[in-house]
Every structure is written in C-alpha cells, then in structure tokens.
C-alpha cells in the first residue's frame, strides 16, 4: 500500500499538460463564478491551498496616495508585522509593480522543514498593479514552485482583481494615476 | 457499466478540478458531496466504487465520515482515498485508523491521482 505520494516539482509525465489545463480552467471558473468579495477571497485561498500548495498567504492593497501597502486579508499567518518591502527588496518590488511575478525558490533541508519559497503575485487592472498576493511557506510535501505554477500565478494576476475588488474598486484603482515605485 | 467515484470536498475549486480530471482522463462516472455528512448519505444511496474524500470539512470531517462508512454494511467495502494538505506520519496514521485505504496529499498531482484510482478501479 502506498501510504504517501509525494508530488515532484518539475516533472512532466504524460498527460500533465492536459491536467494543468484542467487546473487552470478550474481556477478561472472559480474566480469568475465568485458570488461576492468574500467568496472571491475564499476562491483565491482555495486555489493557493489546493493548487499551489501553501496555507500561508495574504493580500496587500496598494494605497497610492500614501505610497504604502495595507493588509487587506490574510490566511494562516498574521501579516500585520510582515515587512513586504523588506521581503521583496527594491528590485523585487519594482518587478511586481511592473506586473511581473516575483518568486523566490527556497531550498529544503529536510522533509521536516517547510520550504522558504515565496511568491509575490501582482493583481493587475489595465496594466497596473493594484494589490499584491503574497504566498508564503509551502506545505512540506510541495518541494518548490514549478513551471505550471507560473501559469497559475499569471491567471491570478490577470483575473483575480475584478472578483476581489469589483468593478468599482478596479476602476478607482485604474484612475489613480501612474504606479508607485520602490 | 462505468465505475462510479464519489468525490467529496468542501472546496468548490478542488471539487471542480478533481471532477474535471476524472471526466477528461478516465471513463469513471463522478458524483460529488460537499462534506462528510453528505458523503455518508450519498455513499449509501449511490453505491460508488470508490470514495475520494477531503479530510478537513465542515459538519463532518473525512476521518469521521470514513469511520461511519466502515460501520455501515452497504459502504463497508468501498475503497476510500483521503485527500489532505497534512502529510505528517501521525496524521496519516489517524487516516488509516479511521479505515481509509489510501492517502494522497494536496496539491493533488492529477497524473498520480488518475494512476491511483486506476489501481483500484482499472482503466
């Protein structure tokens, strides 16, 4: 009896691409069918936990007037004291503000230690980053993010803003002028 | 006649993906339930050939549902595969003590999931 089946990052067995497509479709559908903001937040949590392998995450809303980040929501970790700027660094922040995902690939020392990998996903509206989804420690059985995870990051980046913040919130963010820099 | 799989998860996202994988990659018929209580009821009604069930769910968790299915004559022999984010040995042991046949961790690798189900149900 196989009592534990570890997922292996980077492997591409036959049918893996079709299964990745299924994963993307399910994530897209889940976001699109969100009934309200709470349901959209739950959708993002489900996508990160079920597909990306982390139960520590948070969403930072960008306040352009004060050039600051505010914790909008978190799960599995208290982010009130979390220093997003320090975690990202200047270069990382600039990349995320430009709309690129910033992924840190951690290394695992033993199966007992959770990975230090982190991902910061820009939540975009009309080429502007309006929020940053921070995905923190990975589950022990998830070795690292892989190529198919990048496609999921891109989907979250492009398609999560409207369900999360609604048309009004997105339009407001889009009208607030050019992005802030690091 | 197509083999029937009862997929149980309170996460709409996980349910959607597991159902899609089974429908696209296998010939199995898929029925779903959103928590352990509903799973116990559906297992008795639908007589699935296998139950694929999340552990952490509202109302009744996967361990409790597994125990209940093992206590009922009509569901006692159905293979149960538990799905969870927890991979610790003690947690898995609790799963096997509740009566599950196998255990798979999230994030679910779709290819491995299909292979696992086929090992119980054939292609």
Image (tube, rainbow, N blue to C red):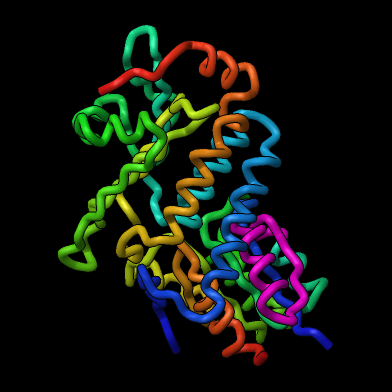
**Seen from this angle, which residue lies furthest left?**
A109
Residue A150 is left or right of residue A110, and the answer is right
Q: In percent of the image, x 49 and y 39: which residue is there?
A: A157
The segment highlighted magenta reads B14-38
Instruction: Name the image quarter holding residue B90.
Output: bottom left
Counting from the top left corner in percent of width and height, residue A113 is at 21, 60
- Indicate whether B41 appears above or below B29: above
- Of B34 and A106, nearer the camera is A106
Residue A103 is left or right of residue A113, and the answer is right
Query: Is A122 covered by the magenta stretch?
Result: no
Q: In percent of the image, x 60 and y 36: which residue is there?
A: A40
Instruction: Name the image quarter holding residue A41.
Output: top right
Residue B96 is left or right of residue B53, and the answer is left
- Magenta segment, principal secondary structure? helix
Where's the C terminus of chain A, which quadrant? Answer: top left
Q: In percent of the image, x 70 and y 41: which residue is there?
A: A33
Counting from the top left corner in percent of width and height, residue B41 is at 76, 65
- Indicate whether B79 appears above or below A181: below
- Of A60 and A152, nearer the camera is A152
Where's the N terminus of chain A, which quadrant? Answer: bottom left
Can residue B97 be seen at all in this image of the molecule?
no
Counting from the top left corner in percent of width and height, residue A127 is at 49, 29
Can residue B59 be seen at all in this image of the molecule?
yes
Q: In percent of the image, x 33 and y 72: which residue is there?
A: B89
């Amino acid at each position: 009896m196989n009592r534990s089946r570890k997922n292996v990052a980077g492997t591409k067995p036959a049918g893996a691409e079709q299964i990745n497509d299924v994963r993307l479709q399910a994530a897209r559908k889940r976001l699109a069918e969100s009934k309200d903001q709470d349901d959209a937040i739950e959708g993002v949590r489900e996508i990160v936990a079920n597909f990306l392998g982390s139960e520590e995450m948070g969403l930072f809303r960008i306040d352009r007037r004060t050039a600051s980040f505010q914790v909008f929501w978190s799960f599995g970790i208290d982010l009130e004291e979390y220093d997003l700027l320090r975690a990202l660094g200047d270069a990382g922040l600039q990349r995320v503000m430009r709309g690129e995902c910033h992924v840190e690939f951690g290394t695992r020392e033993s199966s007992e230690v959770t990975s230090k990998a982190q991902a910061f996903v820009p939540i975009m509206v009309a080429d502007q980053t309006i929020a940053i989804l921070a995905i923190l420690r990975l589950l022990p059985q998830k070795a690292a993010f892989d190529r198919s995870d990048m496609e999921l990051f891109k989907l979250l980046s492009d398609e999560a803003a409207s369900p999360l913040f609604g048309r009004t919130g997105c339009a407001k963010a889009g009208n607030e002028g050019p992005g802030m820099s690091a | 006649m197509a083999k029937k799989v009862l997929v149980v998860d309170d996460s709409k996202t996980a349910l959607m993906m597991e159902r899609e994988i089974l429908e696209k990659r296998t010939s199995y018929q898929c029925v779903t339930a959103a928590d352990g209580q509903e799973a116990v009821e559906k297992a008795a009604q639908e007589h699935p050939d296998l139950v694929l069930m999340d552990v952490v769910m509202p109302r009744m968790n996967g361990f409790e549902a597994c125990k209940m299915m093992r206590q009922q004559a009509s569901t006692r022999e159905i293979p149960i595969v538990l799905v969870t984010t927890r991979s610790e040995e003690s947690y898995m042991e609790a799963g096997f003590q509740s009566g599950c046949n196998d255990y798979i961790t999230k994030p679910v690798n779709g290819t491995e999931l299909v292979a696992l189900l086929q090992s119980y149900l054939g292609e």
